[in-house]
Amino acid sequence: MASAKDDQDQWQSPDLHAWKNDEDNDDEDDGNEFFDANENPTETNLLHERLNEKLNIETPKIEDPYFIDEDLLKERELLLTDEEKEKRHVESQKSKDEGNELFGQGEFDQALAKYSDALSFCPLKQTRDRAVIYANRAACLMKMEKFEPAIQCCTKSIELDGTYLKPYIRRAESYKKIDKLDEALLDYQKILELDPNNSQARHEVHVLPDQIKERNEKMKEEMLGKLKDLGNMILKPFGLSTNNFKLQQDPSTGSYSVNFQK
């Protein structure tokens, strides 16, 4: 059962406390080790060791120092009993709670590590819990201004639970930060589908089309400027410049024709 502490906002945002890390382990921090080595070197134990070794030497993504290898988790889970999975689930909740505390204290890197531990423990069938933890990781990464991996975490959260609002909000904000306005607009439109009363999404859906148009016009001007510079370089040996060519737009079709003038 979630405590009142779980419900406190960790990142203020309009509507639904979008940056709050959710309710919802780890009796002891066992680092990256997924398995406890037994004394008898059975085939299963040797496989456990191989998986642990792979986890420890896995090269993380540069932007995300605690990259989650989902394929490795699937391979590991095949070796676990239902009882072991349930124990891991409890440990996962503890790690998540510890991550929430660290986030509230502004220790975003440490919180990210705890959330990653929580995902390592959390059984794959617990899709909602995993969606929440991925969204919490995204909040940490955004605070660390690592927006690309934040988007990846939000996308994974949405894949696990397409009705969960927070990853859409966090992904939209991350898209805006890296000037992917078209993608942000799509997410805000989806947010309105899930929550028609979300004022932040309503505002963004209203203003983003104009911002996208303004950005596209600016990009077009920059492109035409570069083409003009290239054209002048090519025409210069012939005593010409792009000023000798006038573009005229047909208002009915929007197409352009080029007229030469001396």
Image (cartoon, rainbow, N blue to C red):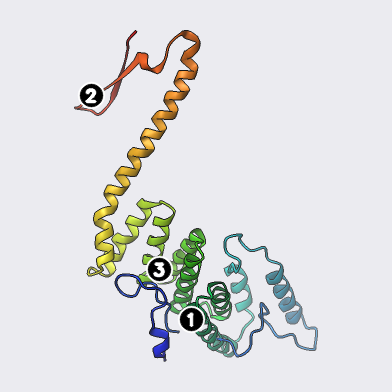
Where residue 167 is drawn, which disc sits there? 3
- The quadrant in which residue 231 appears is top left
Where residue 100 is drawn, which disc sits there? 1
Disc 3: CA contacts within 10 A as few (<14), some (14-19) or many (>=20): many
- Expressed as whole percent of the image width and height from the top left, the position of residue 150 reads 48, 64
Q: Of the residues tagged 2 and 1, which is closer to the observer?
A: 1
Disc 1: CA contacts within 10 A as few (<14), some (14-19) or many (>=20): many
Secondary structure at numbered mark 3: helix
Disc 2: CA contacts within 10 A as few (<14), some (14-19) or many (>=20): few
* Location of mark 2 (residue): 250
Gap between marks 3 and 2 measured at Cα? 45 Å
Dot 3 and dot 2 residues touching (CB under 8 Å):
no
> From what the image shows, is residue 136 above or below residue 80?
above
Which amino acid does the dot numbered 1 rest on? Asn
Which residue occupies 37% across, 69% down?
162
Gap between marks 2 and 1 measured at Cα? 60 Å
Tell which of 232 and 183 is nearer to you.
Answer: 232
